[in-house]
Image (spheres, rainbow, N blue to C red):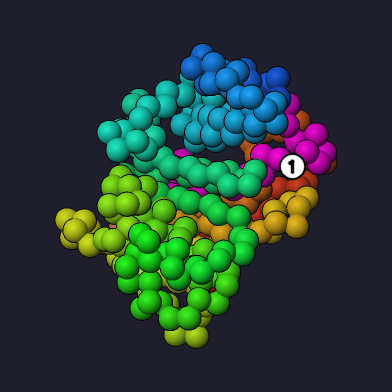
């Protein structure tokens, strides 16, 4: 893995061109993950869970040079994921409406969030539940304003490990002049550490849905690469049609408008 942060946006419900081999995905899981998959009442929920966990393991295995099934994933005191065998790496992931965003960063903390873009009743009121300064962001022009703010809050508290109820009040958001989308100004009480954040909006392959993504990283100017809809070959069928559907990664260091 190159220096900086890398993220992978994956549509786990995309069945075009035989994207998923569910039996192979299941083989990537740990015994604990398999037991959890077997506890789902709905078969479709179990399939989604298996694909998500396999995709996470495949991405991490590819970046760390390990077989997906051998990647050890632990839980931090705050509840977030950690990689016990790679303490210099920070990992974060999020799922929404059949879409997975997983990211890995070397030497700095990272948090990510993905949300399906949809109508929200009283968006300013919803945001104020966790972010009292929502009024400072101006009029909420749905859905850009709300979902850029919400995903940045979620990603920021994952990066700091403080949780939404406690950590969201420490996040500082603003609305750039002339923009409908919010951006990250910083995080208070973070020991003087600077933070960077970016948001992007994407159409989901094979669906009318769209998602908003946010990636928050510790430090300024850290290179960030987001691979959109690219699933490593360990999950995909190794055929030309699948390979042809991998678009180029999106790079950047700040908020993408």
- Which residue occupies 28% across, 61% down? 169
The residue located at (27%, 52%) in the rendering is: 166
In the image, residue 154 above or below residue 182: above
Which residue is at 61% across, 64% downward? 119
Q: Residue 251: x percent and y percent?
A: 53, 59
Q: Is residue 4 above or below residue 49?
A: below
Identity of the residue drawn at 50% across and 44% down: 94
Q: Is residue 15 left or right of residue 221?
A: right
Coordinates of residue 142 in the picture (x, y in percent): 57, 72
Q: Where are the magenta residues, as a range?
A: 1-21
The one nearer the camera, 60 or 207, is 207
Q: Is residue 139 magenta?
A: no
Per the image, the residue denoted by label 1 is 14
> How many C-alpha atoms fall within 10 Å of the one at disc 1: few (<14), some, or many (≥20)?
some
For the residue pair 38 and 52, the one nearer the viewer reads as 38
Determine the image quadrant of residue 136: bottom left
Q: Tag 1's secondary structure? A: loop
């Amino acid at each position: 893995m190159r220096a900086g942060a890398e993220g992978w946006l994956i549509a786990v419900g995309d069945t075009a061109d035989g994207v998923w081999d569910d039996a192979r995905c299941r083989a990537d899981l740990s015994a604990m993950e398999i037991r959890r998959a077997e506890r789902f009442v709905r078969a479709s929920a179990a399939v989604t869970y298996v694909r998500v966990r396999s995709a996470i393991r495949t991405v991490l295995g590819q970046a760390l040079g390990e077989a997906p099934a051998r990647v050890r994933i632990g839980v931090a005191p705050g509840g977030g994921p950690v990689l016990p065998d790679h303490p210099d790496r920070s990992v974060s992931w999020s799922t929404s409406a059949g879409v997975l965003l997983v990211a890995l960063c070397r030497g700095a903390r990272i948090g990510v969030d993905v949300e399906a873009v949809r109508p929200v009743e009283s968006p300013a009121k919803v945001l104020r539940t966790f972010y009292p300064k929502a009024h400072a962001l101006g009029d909420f022009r749905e859905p850009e304003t709300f979902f850029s703010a919400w995903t940045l809050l979620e990603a920021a508290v994952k990066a700091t490990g403080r949780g939404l109820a406690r950590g969201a009040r420490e996040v500082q958001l603003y609305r750039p002049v002339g923009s409908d989308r919010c951006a990250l100004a910083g995080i208070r009480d973070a020991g003087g550490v600077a933070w960077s954040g970016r948001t992007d909006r994407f159409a989901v392959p094979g669906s009318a849905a769209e998602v908003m993504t946010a990636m928050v990283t510790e430090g300024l100017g850290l290179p960030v690469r987001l691979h959109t809809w690219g699933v490593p070959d360990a999950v995909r069928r190794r055929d030309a049609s699948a390979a042809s559907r991998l678009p180029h990664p999106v790079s950047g260091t700040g908020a993408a408008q």
